[in-house]
Amino acid sequence: MLVSVLKFVSEQLTKLNGLLDALRANPFYAAKLAGTGLLDGVTNLSEFSARCPFTTKAELVADQQAHPPYGTNLTFPLERYTRCHQTSGSSGSPLRWLDTPESWTWMLDNWETVHRQAGTTAADRIFFAFSFGPFLGFWTAFESAQRLGCLVISGGGMTSVARLKAILDLQATILCCTPTYALHLAEVAAKEGLDLRRSCVKTLSVAGEPGGSIPATRARLEELWPGARVYDHHGMTEVGPVSYECPDRPGVLNIIRRAFIAEVVDPATGQSVGNEGRGELILTTLGRTGSPLLRYRTGDLVQLSTLNSHPATSPIDSSDLALEGGILGRVDDMVVVRGVNVYPSAIEEIIRRVGGVAEYQVHVSQRQALTELTVTVEPAAQVAGPELAGKLTAAFGSSLALRVPVALAAPGALPRFESKAKRWLRE
């Protein structure tokens, strides 16, 4: 085991030093790292973490605004780049991201890991329930599945009803979408009289939200899609596909460490949280040389697993880093209500555990310097609203030690989401 770990660290260091050498031609990092000596290479990963400053999204946004349209984080001449994507802008201004063919191949390799760990083979038929806009994840998932030999089916430009009929008629075995949209498709199926027990879907490959690793949400999805198992994963436009779910440990995500240097730090101090702490995920991309990131503050809140080693019989790379509960939320999404830290994932877990909710919204308001939460729920069909509100109020009080008012919405009143859900509204 020690020999394999030393070999892995040596391989990471070789990749890192190759990247640092290439960044001499990258205007953004050549300026950012000036005076650090890092472009001459490092002798170990601890030296890199100690000497390399964080990269933040605010820096990248400012760089693109100062040098439109793509900024200066480009290691090669513009004609070397063949792909352009952008972030959703869900946490600020959107970023445009360019990739060379080599960087694109690196991301497809990472996505293949996600597919394979979910049990995907060339015999599968994968339905992608996305609009196929400028967001990177849709395209990398689609192309990597195609490269695996799967039959890939685009659901772009279709209504939810049309997508459901295609899933059933084309006998799709894997559905790729957000957890929220998989729930919504099941809701639509019930209204349209489409029996999901006829579905061939055996895998729900979900991402974009914490829901895939929330036990109550997973259980609800697997109840609504009979015979299917949820597999969670995550990634970002800025860094590409990052993690896959451990097949033996539902709700635990493993970072693909051959592709990244991963750290977890205290969001306030920037210091490492140790082997079993909770904090912000920091990533360095080892193979996206055309548009790299060094020590990028992802803003994702994670909990390092207490079981970061895998059995010898496990298909998991023993060097990969395990995250308990997947992505718990965004660092800046946490709200403090009367001294209690409340994360969106905690609210969803309670709502899905109670059940009977078709959709919900959370309203965050400030009253006389105090933060208040109000939850609005739309009851599912044949669910009594007042009784549901009472159950939720009691569950919030029991789990959070807070009184959270629950309001009721009329059927169909709350928005549905195809991509990332935007349920938290802040005044």
Image: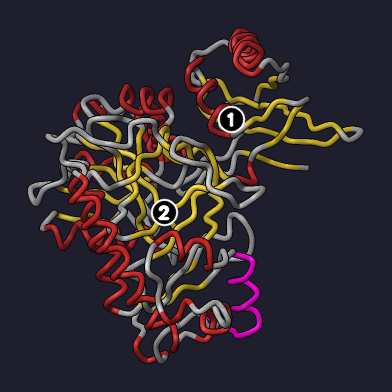
Tell which of 193 and 324 is nearer to you.
324
Residue 339: name its quadrant: top right
Answer few, some or many: residues within 10 Å of disc 1's Cα (few below 14, many 20 plus, some between 14 and 19).
many
From what the image shows, is residue 241 above or below residue 405?
Answer: below
Answer few, some or many: residues within 10 Å of disc 2's Cα (few below 14, many 20 plus, some between 14 and 19).
some
* Numbered label tally: 2
Residue 50 horizontal/vertical position (percent): 52, 62
Left or right: 29 as drawn, with respect to 160: right
At 59% from the left edge and 78% from the top edge, which residue is drawn?
64
Q: What quarter of the picture does the N terminus occupy?
A: top left
Residue range in magenta is: 57-70
Mark identifier at residue 262: 2
From what the image shows, is residue 427 above or below residue 3?
Answer: above
**66 falls in the magenta region:** yes
* Circles 1 and 2: CB atoms closer than 8 Å: no
At 78% from the left edge and 25% from the top edge, which residue is drawn?
338
Residue 291: name its quadrant: bottom left
Label 1 or label 2, whichever comes before in sequence order: 2
Residue 244 horizontal/vertical position (percent): 30, 45
Outermost residue to the left: 123
Gap between marks 1 and 2, in whole Å? 34 Å
Residue 364: name its quadrant: top right
Q: Identify the secondary structure beneath mark 1.
A: strand
The label nearer to you, 1 versus 2, is 2
Q: Amino acid at mark 1?
A: Tyr
Tell which of 390 and 320 is nearer to you.
320
Q: What quarter of the picture does the C terminus occupy?
A: top right
At 22% from the left edge and 60% from the top edge, which residue is drawn?
144
Q: Which residue is mark 1?
A: 360
Q: Which secondary structure is most common in the magenta stretch? A: helix
Q: Amino acid at mark 2?
A: Ala
